[in-house]
Image (cartoon, rainbow, N blue to C red):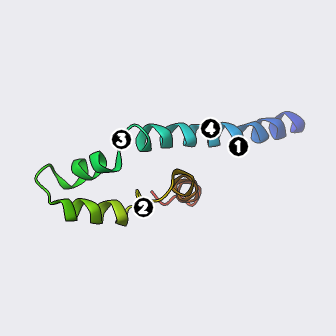
């Protein structure tokens, strides 16, 4: 019984990481930073306002850094 519980807990880590990776890829790779900024700020926003939003939300950094930040925020429940 105990070994079954431990095994399931050990399997849940990679599954959770896989789900986080999948959602990250869906939201970050499919949508370009410019499209996300337009969606957040509105289509009539200025280019400078969109660039500021992109920098503020870290969308200008490499994907690996964005993913590490995303995982850290998920694990600390900072939604």
**Lower position in the chain sequence, tag 3 or tag 4:** 4
Q: Residues within 10 Å of mark 4 (few under 14, many from 20)?
A: few
Q: Do the residues bearing badges 4 and 2 touch, measured as CB atoms within 8 Å? A: no
Residue holding disc 2: 58
Q: State the SS at label 4.
A: helix
Using the image as rendered, state which of residue 6 and residue 39 is in the foreground: 39
Along the polypeptide, which appears first: circle 2 or circle 3? 3
Which badge, 4 or 1, is on the more N-terminal residue? Answer: 1
Residue at horizontal 33 percent and vertical 59 percent from the top: 54
Q: Residue at x 15, y 60 (%)?
A: 46
Q: Which residue is mark 3?
A: 31
Q: Nearer the viewer, mark 3 or mark 4?
A: 3
Where, quadrant-wise, is the N terminus in this rendering?
top right
**Which residue is depicted at the point 76% across and 41% down?**
9
Tell me the SS state at disc 1: helix
Q: Is residue 32 left or right of residue 2?
A: left
| Cα distance between the residues tagged 1 and 3 | 27 Å
The tag on residue 13 is: 1
- Using the numbered discs, state the Cα–Cα distance from disc 2 to disc 1 in whole angstroms: 26 Å
Nearest to the eye among marks 4 and 2: give it: 2
The answer to whether mark 2 and mark 3 are in CB contact below 8 A is no
Q: Which residue is nearer to you in this view: 64 or 18?
A: 64
Q: Spatial distance from mark 4 to mark 1, Cα to Cα?
A: 9 Å
Q: Which mark is residue 18?
A: 4
């Amino acid at each position: 019984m105990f070994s079954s519980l431990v095994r399931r807990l050990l399997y849940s880590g990679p599954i959770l990481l896989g789900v986080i990776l999948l959602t990250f890829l869906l939201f970050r790779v499919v949508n370009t930073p410019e499209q996300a900024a337009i969606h957040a700020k509105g289509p009539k926003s200025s280019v400078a306002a969109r660039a500021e939003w992109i920098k503020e939300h870290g969308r200008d950094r490499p994907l690996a850094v964005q993913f590490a930040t995303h995982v850290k925020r998920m694990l600390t429940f900072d939604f």
